[in-house]
Amino acid sequence: MRRTFPLLLGIFLILSCNNQDIPTTITGQLSNIQDSIITIELSLDQITRIRSIDYRTEFLIEKDGTFSIPVDMPYPGTVTLISNDYNFIAFVILLQGGEIHLTADCANVKETLEYHGSNSGINTFNFQWQQLNDPAYRELRQNAKSYRLLKNGLDSLQTVSMKMLEDFHSTEKLNKEELLWLRSKIQYGKFVTLNRQAYRLKAQPGDSNYQLFETLNLEDHEAVLISPTYVNVILDYILYEVNAKGIYYSSLEDNSEYFETFYQVIRERLTGKVHDVMLSIFISNLLNDFEEGAPKFYERYLVDCKSPDMIKKTSAVYDEHLEIKNQNLSDNVVLMSTGQEEPLEVLSRFENQVLLLDFWASWCSPCIYGIPHTKELAGHYKDSAVSVVYIGYDDQESSLINAIKKHQMDGIHIILNKAETGTWRKEFSIRGIPTYVLINKEGEVIPMNNPHQLNEDTYTIIDSLLSTGL
């Protein structure tokens, strides 16, 4: 399999470098739009799993409904566009640079959204396909009474979808990269669904519900370079193989055996570009999460990975890992001990203050994405009777400390141990993170419409609490 390496590397360079130097711009013409602001969110880099939290996210929609958004991100990637009033939502898949233009009547976006220009073929098909596939998929999930019936239904849905793609390609002439991305999404999306279903059924490794992996192509060296769907399926497969050995990840325990097994599964079961990409993703995750032993794994990775392009990507992550790890905490970071007190006793130290608690973890991408919003809120109320407290939750202290340094999270931090995580989870009914909790000056929890996101309502509630003195 190693003999195919030069050819595969050539394919990757074509995919990753094609029009990389051409600026990417998303423009639009919207009618019946009520809002003046459009917000964007960029997908993670497929290898390093990093999304910049410093890019500009809000852009103006002009009075005539036009907008223009410059995008700087590695390909392949996805941009999500949302108007602040949710009157307009669209997804843009980017495989190369250039200008892509969107038009839509916001009174009925599903029926009127159109894509023109660069990347328009892949986005047009994906949008049309989802309008047909998503309702059929939901109905199938609701009515399939068994795992076997779900699989049969997904097989039929996949056949119809592939025929739809062939018909579209015969008239619109998708390019090679677009066709590969779309085929992979249809072909491997079934595996993602069936694996999730097996998990929901609490199937154990070795159960017949996991026979899907016996038919999975582990050597789709082109798809692994461009398809997030295929990458996720391979990650599911690796995780299954690790769990089949009775080894599971724990966010608060020593995971050295878990990581060693994960690494060995990749080395033993995968080959060629699939091996190198998945190994690079694994190493990037270790480095990004500041896991113990990450530098030693990186040394082994440099020997085992045969793709210079992958090593180039991960080397930047490794350099940042060392730089941050060797930094001292800022003098503006306050680590507050719980003193083993109950949650409300700890928080009673903030006398006559409105509190915003940000429950987060270093491994939680949505938490990290929300940090700039928490920092912005803290800055807005810096001269008010408001205290923002970051609660490090369900995570190891060393990972949290390094994440605090990496994301420059000045302010007050409480880092919970395993027992405290359970206590605070129960006290504040934490079901997932990020979770934001507001507490008035009397120590009472104030309900929020969306406890998992900071928005204008959060500011309104805090202003009300400050004005009433509660």
Image (cartoon, rainbow, N blue to C red):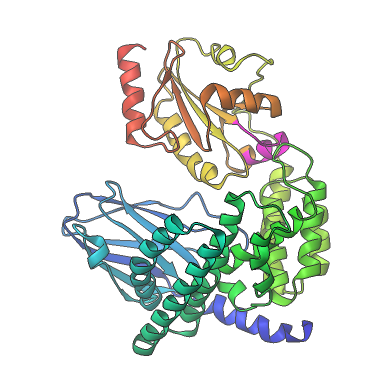
Left or right position of 157 against 412: left
Tell me which corner region of the image, top left, top right, bottom left or bottom right, holds residue 8: bottom right
Give the x, y percent position of residue 73.
Answer: 49, 63
Quick check: is 399 in the magenta stretch?
Answer: yes
Give the vertical position of 302 relative to 461 (above or below): below
In the displayed structure image, the side of residue 161 where residue 429 appears, left or right:
right
Q: Is residue 243 above or below residue 29?
A: above
- Indicate left or right for 277 with 182 as reference: right
**Image position, residue 399 (x, y; %):** 69, 40
State the residue lying farthest toward the front.
145
- Residue 302 belongs to magenta span: no
Left of 392 or right of it: where is 357?
left
Q: Could you say which is closer to the camera, residue 349 or residue 382?
A: 349
Query: Residue 444's quadrant in the figure?
Result: top left
Q: Position of residue 338 (x, y in %)?
A: 65, 18
The residue that appears at 45% across and 84% down in the rendered structure is: 175
The image position of residue 364, as x and y in percent, is 58, 44
Instruction: Tell me which residue sits at (51%, 63%) in the image.
Output: 150
Q: Quadrant of the N terminus?
A: bottom right
In the rendered image of this protein, does residue 389 appear above or below residue 374? above
Q: Which residue is depicted at the point 41% across and 69% down?
A: 24
Q: Is residue 75 visible?
A: no
Q: Residue furthest bottom?
A: 170
Q: Which residues are magenta?
A: 392-403
Q: Can residue 212 be spotted in the picture?
A: yes
